[in-house]
Amino acid sequence: MRARTVRAWSLVHTWTSLVATTFLLVLCVTGLPLIFHVEIDAWLDPVPAQTGTPPGGSMPSLDSIVAAALEKHPGDVPISLGFLQDWPAVVVQSAPDVRSTFKDSHRTTFDLSTGLPSNARDQVRGRLTTFLRDLHTELFLGLPGELFLGAMALLFLAAIVSGVVLYAPFMRRLEFGTVRTRSSRMRRLDLHNLIGIATMIWLLVVGATGAINTLHDIVAAQVRTEIIRMARSHSGPPPAKRTSVDAAIATGRKALPGGSLISFFFPGAGFATPHHYAVFARGDRPITSKLFYAALVDAETGELADVFEMPWYAKALLLSQPLHFGDYGGLPLKIIWALFDVAAIVVLISGVYLWFSRRTSNALSSARRRGLQAGAQ
């Protein structure tokens, strides 16, 4: 590689790193506890033990559970079913009218094995992890903050690529992993290069997935628009008589590749049409559990009307989330991700230190030369 080319790549590596370092440090520091957000939330806000009677005989139908919820709130109509991820329970939402606001609706949780009211709930993000997540994803600035961090992530990727390009010419005469000890600056430089090249793949994965994740709000809005468009293409009059909820869900699940139910909307509510039920399910594997699929079922005949599969860009975004935080392989993978995160913090801080120390050294050398020239005159 020519000297001019090396200098050009060195400038790219230096300035992309320096511009993004402050924000990358914020992301690394906040991302470290977010890797363990489930464990932190469970410790700070434990989910209460479930109440209810052990199941006896066959499981109750969802139709009977919906009927029980409506008995508790006379005059209501069913709006939706929300299936808990951590417990075998369902939240039945009802309201005086299908167009009622959320605050005017009633929500009752039922145990799916007994059909009895339950206090089960999923673990939700606590105040601490919500604060850290908002800082990590948007700097409390909403969409502009997300897009700004996306730009910083792209600079980070440029810094990684340029660092890899520079590694070979700078280390061509040394064995991999060599740390020279002739001076403290040389030792820090070699450690910076070694840790950076050793964590390169992880840094690329986290940087790329982080950049993709900053588009979450934009992609989510587009997906909602496409689901609504699909629903409107199948609109029709309210059904004269509704088919069974259990039968409609069974029809939807046969058409969906997902493993577990997320939600179910009654005609006229949410993403359903006035004539159709809407069934949502998620994938059945650790990574694909972030993906969801939807089906429209004719509420009068119980026949499948249409299936919605997420577009490729939405799949890329949702699949990038578990890769970014390492939360698809249990606690061992989270610990590995945390160690890499600490290594990234070391690389960032050491890079800034090396830049400042070099500038200080160059400034002292220039001052010394000027002093010698003045003395010679």
Image: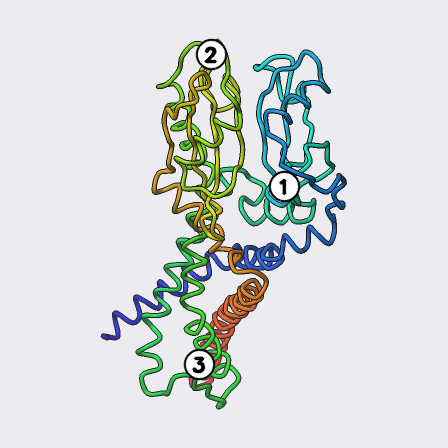
Identify residue type, mark 2. Answer: Pro
Count how many numbered circles sit on residues in the image: 3
Is the residue under label 2 in contact with that under label 1 (CB below 8 Å)? Answer: no
Q: Residue at x 45, y 48 (%)?
A: 288
Q: Which mark is residue 369?
A: 3
Where residue 218 sits, quadrant-wise, is top left
Residue that protrudes farthest toward the bottom in the picture: 182
Kindly report the distance in space between the C-alpha atoms of the residues bearing marks 2 and 3.
Answer: 90 Å
For label 1, the SS is: loop
Mark nearest the camera among 2 and 3 is 2
Tell which circle, 1 or 2, labels the residue nearer the N-terminal end.
Answer: 1
Q: Which residue matches tag 2?
A: 239
Q: Residue at x 29, y 72 (%)?
A: 6
Location of residue 154 in the rendering, given as x and y in whole percent from the top left corner: 39, 53
Tell which circle, 2 or 3, labels the residue nearer the N-terminal end.
Answer: 2
How is the structure coloured here?
rainbow
Tell me the quarter of the image containing the C terminus.
bottom left
User: For mark 2, does the 10 Å Cα neighbourhood hold few (<14), some (14 to 19), or many (20 or more) residues?
Assistant: some
For label 2, the SS is: loop
Q: Is residue 236 above or below residue 364?
A: above
Kindly report the distance in space between the C-alpha atoms of the residues bearing marks 1 and 2.
Answer: 30 Å
Q: Which mark is residue 88?
A: 1
Where residue 26 sits, quadrant-wise, is bottom right
